Image (cartoon, rainbow, N blue to C red):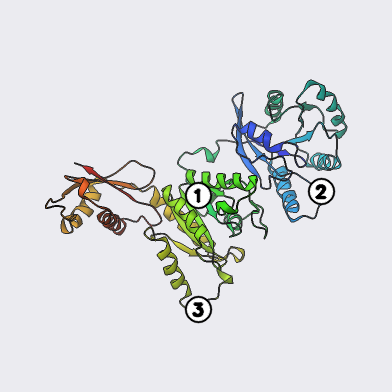
Amino acid sequence: MALVSIVGRPNVGKSTLFNRLVGMRKAIVDDIAGVTRDRHYGRCEWCGREFSVVDTGGYTTNSDDVFEAAIRRQVQIAIDESDVILFMVEAATGITDYDSDIADILRRSKKPVVLCVNKVDTGAKIFDTYQFYGLGLGELFSISAANGSGTGELLDEICRVLPEDAGPDPQDRPDLPHIAIVGKPNVGKSSLTNALLGEERNIVTPVAGTTRDSISTYFNKFGHEFMLVDTAGMRRKSKVSEDLEFYSVLRSIRAIENADVCVLMIDATQGMESQDMNVFNLIQRNRKGCVVVVNKWDLFEKDSNTMKEYTEALKSRLAPFDDVPVIFTSVTKKQRVLDVLDAIARVSENYSRKIPTARLNEALLPIIEETPPPAWKGKYVRIKYITQLPTRFPSFAFFCNLPQYVKDPYKRFLENRLREQFDFTGCPVQIFIRKK
């Protein structure tokens, strides 16, 4: 699918226009400069034509700040891979040094450039736009990304210069699993995403809270295919004071709700802390598959049984949902990164597994007959039939004569027998007792 990149200096309204083009509040927008850091992809449709849009961070040229240097690299990647570049400037400030530097870069790229002057909210401000002809980028389009005026003409021009689509987008498949990488700040989520993709997809720095948005990327390597979602770190609610972080956490929670499998990353040197348990409980409440990745294992002092003891201590905290794969990695040294990929694929397969009714009854009814539910007030419960329900996650209905007398301990017994007979590692299993 054809790709359009939105570039410009900080705080000219790139994310606001991106949200308007994709038709949803996908990117975080704030009055302060430098909110967007990573490349953020979305999809726009106009007059029957569909294309991808990428939002980038504000481009600066004379700063040595660790974030701004990384943002410059991300913007350059976006320019290199795009078919059309949408260059945004601001009417009120006129041509700045940053605008001139970006215009020079775009001229050298030899790609179609559409010049867009933002924040033209009233007719009087149109007179401020004519100076931008001095950038030498041809015709300009005056818009207001906040209220949408002028965006129709802008989209007409984009569609005119876009090349023909190469073919269907692989991301259109509804059966494509979504994998969310979640955890506290600074545990290595973006580093793991970059290691799996084999490229610098997301900005990585030693500063906690580097990632602000939930960034989705199509993954198709080593025989695995899914959407990989890198999320912002989730801190305890009492620790969140800035609006930006509040919205980042909301988007991380939404990523968990929309995912099929969540990769919970924890810091090996800190262990499973209370906030890690909060994130795990959120995954469990939303009935998502889970893989636990213990990162920074190279920094942990070890002996011959350390990994086994660490796993046992970790699973004791996760109980009763302790049937989850635990992978020990050092992402910076590329240790066991492919093991994470294999665990994701296994849990994703288990999450979508459908078991035929005949096989379910054949495997479980003899076990239930041998160990029936305890009698209650002299009444005996007889389970006669089992079937899997058509839900997104594994859930099963057990039909019996007296469902009200089947208590939670026996439901856990049924779940454990299900896990023994069929592979549901990493997946929540829900048991329903129904009247036959």
Residue 410: x and y in percent read 25, 55
Residue indicated by mark 2: 61
Q: CA distance from mark 2 to mark 3?
A: 49 Å
Of helix, strand and loop, which one carries label 3?
A: loop
| Comes first in the chain, label 1 or label 2 | 2
Residue 284: x and y in percent read 42, 52
Residue 6: x and y in percent read 71, 38
Residue indicated by mark 1: 179
Front residue of 117 and 273: 273
The single residue placed furthest to the left in the displayed view is 378
Three-letter residue code for mark 3: Asp
Mark 3: give few (<14), some (14-19) or many (20+) Cα within 10 Å. Answer: few
For the C terminus, give its image quadrant. Answer: top left
| Comes first in the chain, label 3 or label 1 | 1
Assess whether mark 1 and mark 3 are in contact (beta carbons under 8 angstroms): no
Mark 1: give few (<14), some (14-19) or many (20+) Cα within 10 Å. Answer: many
Mark 2: give few (<14), some (14-19) or many (20+) Cα within 10 Å. Answer: few
Say left or right for 33 vs 45.
right
Residue indicated by mark 3: 303
Of helix, strand and loop, which one carries label 1?
A: strand
Say left or right for 121 vs 277.
right
Q: CA distance from mark 1 to mark 2?
A: 35 Å
Assess whether mark 2 and mark 1 are in contact (beta carbons under 8 angstroms): no
| Comes first in the chain, label 2 or label 3 | 2
Quarter of the figure with residue 162: top right
The single residue placed furthest to the front in the displayed view is 238
Does the rendering let one see residue 5?
no
